[in-house]
Amino acid sequence: MKKWIIVSGAALLLFAAIGVKYMAKQKNSEEKAGDSSDLVAVDTAKPEKKDLQRFVEVYGSLAPKTSTEVKSEIPGRVAEIRVKEWDSVTPQDILLELDPTDFKVELNRNEAGLQMAKAQHLEAKAGLNRAMREWERTMKLKEAGLVTGQEVDERKSELESAEARANLAEAQIGQAQAMVAESKRNMSKTKVYAPITGAVSERKVDKGDWVDRGAPLFAVVDNRILDLTANVPATEFPKVREGQNLVFSVDGLPGQTFTGSVKRLNPLVSSSDRSGRIQAEVSNAEGKLRGGIFARGKIVIEEKKQALTVPKNALLSFNIEKGTASVFVIKSPDTAVLKNVATGLATEETIEITSGINDNDDIVIRGGFNLKDGTKVTVTNSRQQAEPAAADKAGKGNSTQEKK
């Protein structure tokens, strides 16, 4: 019986050893079946169509396109000021009036001189007519032989003198008329009108002040159109052209943007800071902007509509100068294929692909540096996301595609 017990124990030990070996083998097979260490995990995405812009950042200041300093055209004392600083004005508005007393006296005197000149002209014309009649009578007597040659010469001299006096009187009328016109003009200048439509930015005189000819009175600015003068780095300056759009913002108006158009470019680049200056024209119909405000913005130097783009981190062997790069495209069954592409316009995060792929390709956007052409991969994002999205689309039936 003791022998039977020993045999039975040995048999049990044998079966236990066989069972342990089988379980270990089964576990090892399962581990090998589930082992994916030879597959490279990657993230993918499809190329997107977007509107792209390439721009140059600029900094500058705004100034009114039209501004003028109003000066006195005549000397005089300020009798009345009609406007205050910051008032809106038009060319029909009177800004200031000078005392017209002296100019009224001058006008009256010159008008009297004109009347005197006209009277002298009438007297000279009468003398001329008399001299002409005497000359005609003398010529008839000469034909009859009743006058001497000396008398003929005297009558001729009298006629010439009368003609000269008449011409002088006529010239004096013209001179007197000019003086009257000048006096009237000076009278009109005692009222100083706004030269342009705009606003009075500065008043430089007070009531009672004496002003000389050419003395500054007011500064008037027209803020309806502003000039934005800005500096552009010399490396980007050759890419700026007249007519390009400029988008900018200003301090004090957060969240608001304004637009302008490049109108002029300085032909020289500054030797001190190696920058070129541009001037853009900005419409300010709503009057939100003011001259002297600092502005920061960008000039759009290139623009593409609905360009095919991929994230920059998807690119391999990117050559900026030649515009070439490589990307990995996932082909069935889960194989990464290296493709050469041509690049175009770039932003901070995306880049345009002009050839080499299409918008249906799955592009590796993460994990590509661990790949070689033909490497087997496991996609960790796009395929898992695509299936719920497809199911959701099939369930809803109607979906709105977001406009890129």
Image (cartoon, rainbow, N blue to C red):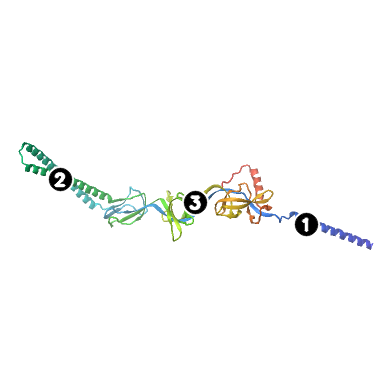
Q: Residue at x 60, y 55 (%)?
A: 317
Q: Residue at x 49, y 51 (%)?
A: 300
Q: Pinpoint residue 179: horizontal percent, then vertical percent.
A: 22, 49
| Left-right relation of 304 to 140 | right
For label 2, the residue is 164
- C-alpha distance separating marks 3 and 1: 63 Å
- Element at label 2: helix
Report if residue 294 is visible in the image.
Answer: no
Q: Nearer the viewer, mark 3 or mark 1?
A: 3
Label whose residue precedes the other's in the sequence (3 or 1): 1
For label 1, the residue is 28
| Left-right relation of 391 to 236 | right
Q: Pinpoint residue 201: horizontal percent, then vertical percent.
A: 37, 54
Q: Pinpoint residue 3: horizontal percent, then vertical percent.
A: 94, 62
- C-alpha distance separating marks 2 and 1: 139 Å
- C-alpha distance separating marks 3 and 2: 76 Å
Residue type beneath disc 1:
Asn
- Element at label 1: helix
Q: Pinpoint residue 234: horizontal percent, then vertical percent.
A: 47, 57
For label 3, the residue is 301
| Mark 3 vs 2: CB contact within 8 A | no
